Image: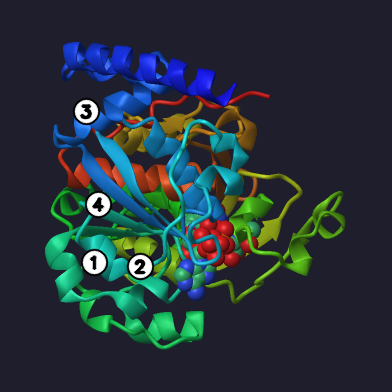
Amino acid sequence: MTVQKGEKQKRMRLQYTQKARMMKRCRNQRYCSRQASCEIIKIRETENMIKAGIIGATGYAGGELVRLLMGHREAEIVWYGSRSYIDKKYADVYRNMFEIVEDVCRDDNLEKLAGEADVIFTATPQGFCASLMSEEILSQTKVIDLSADYRIKDVAVYEKWYGMEHKSPQFIKEAVYGLCEINREQIRGARLLANPGCYPTCSTLSVYPAVKEGLIDTATLIIDAKSGTSGAGRGAKVDNLFCEVNENIKAYGVANHRHTPEIEEQLGYAAGHPVTLNFTPHLVPMNRGILITAYASLKKDVTYADVKALYQKYYEKEKFVRVLDEGVCPQTRWVEGSNYVDVNVVVDARTNRLIMMGAMDNLVKGAAGQAVQNMNLMFGLPESMGLELAPVFP
Ligand SMILES: NC(=O)C1=CN([C@@H]2O[C@H](COP(=O)(O)OP(=O)(O)OC[C@H]3O[C@@H](n4cnc5c(N)ncnc54)[C@H](OP(=O)(O)O)[C@@H]3O)[C@@H](O)[C@H]2O)C=CC1
Ligand SMILES: CC(=O)N[C@@H](CCC(=O)OP(=O)(O)O)C(=O)O
């Protein structure tokens, strides 16, 4: 049986290798079949495919990166980094990758990987990337860090909110905050990219035009946020057990969540002055998704049409930010599995407040999708390459 399968695969490989050679750089053929894709990936190794290494490939954010990069026609994964599953087949950790990923997990040796990869994604706990970063690494490869290590410019603020010493503060200034819709030009030239947090991405994009245009009083800004459980990662924690999360909703990190200073910093740049706000996250019994509802007092007398025009001014040309129609509130289900952020507003004339809403998939636009969007910009590729996925429904 095994022999027969082996023979068949050999024949198919030959066939597909020939096919791949004929296709040369025909970019749209990668998924003509699973076997073909393997061969075509190999052929393209010699054709300047971006070699990507993932440290933390066995986590939820890293796993989503694997899924997205498998569908990226200019990138291939050369390193599935892990700490607990070294030498184990990646597809044995995530069986959705059965017959799709054949590689085994390797260690988390950032220095060694720097010599093999054009780009390294660190989808690891806070502090890991900062503890290993060096000029030697950055002179060989680009690094996209999905943790918060380089997101906050003031090291004292980072150390206070994250409760740890920053091990390489000398790189904070150089790191570019990778919110593509706002920092696109700086991202293009970055060696070290700080991929934004999930809550900060959805919060900032939902509120940004109103803050930038001075439409709201930022001192009154309150951001209420809800997240699915994958936001907490794959590690076993009592708080995330089925019986704790199912049929339940709870606030956490009230008045002290570590994403607060990140959102304040980004909105401060937009406002042109420091911003202090309330940010309250909630854990909801869903796998994925973030929903933001933000409130602030209006400084101007405006209608929905005025505010919509302002949001369109910033987002009309943004593929991944969709400003919904009047009266339509964003829902996590409409963005699930995709890189989209849906936003909308309501002008509440009765309370003179603007209510700003946003929905996004925490693992895609909130983590891996945005990381791929950043990689595309850093390598001069079309920004949406590998991300043109419609949301899944239901
Ligand atoms: N989940 C989300 O929605 C989002 C997550 N992020 C950020 O992405 C990063 C990863 O998050 P997430 O995927 O959720 O976390 P997970 O807990 O699911 O995964 C963590 C990964 O890091 C590895 N790892 C754990 N500890 C260490 C260590 N001490 N040294 C090296 N590697 C280690 C794990 O490897 P192994 O399992 O093999 O031991 C695993 O692959 C975090 O910084 C998180 O804040 C950012 C935005 C959204
Ligand atoms: C539900 C849940 O627990 N969410 C996480 C979000 C963490 C995350 O995504 O971390 P970074 O964006 O900072 O990397 C939390 O609140 O800590």
Q: Which residue is mark 2?
A: 151
**Is residue 269 something one can see in this rendering?**
yes
Task: Give the CA distance from mark 2 to mark 1.
Answer: 8 Å
Q: Which residue is mark 1?
A: 175
Establish if 103 lies above or below 23: below
Would the CB of label 2 be found within 8 Å of ligand 2?
A: yes
Q: Which residue is mark 3?
A: 43
Dot placed on the residue nearer the N-terminal end, 4 or 1? 1
Position in image of residue 135 (x %, y %): 16, 74
Q: Which residue is mark 4?
A: 183
Task: Give the CA distance from mark 4 to mark 2.
Answer: 13 Å
Q: How is the image coloured?
A: rainbow
Residue drawn 26% across and 18% down? 17
Give the side of residue 137 with respect to residue 7, left or right. Answer: left
Residue drawn 18% across and 59% down? 141
Dot placed on the residue nearer the N-terminal end, 4 or 2? 2
Would the CB of label 1 be found within 8 Å of ligand 2?
A: no
Query: Which quarter of the rendering shows the N terminus?
Result: top right
Dot placed on the residue nearer the N-terminal end, 2 or 3? 3
Residue drawn 28% across and 61% down? 113
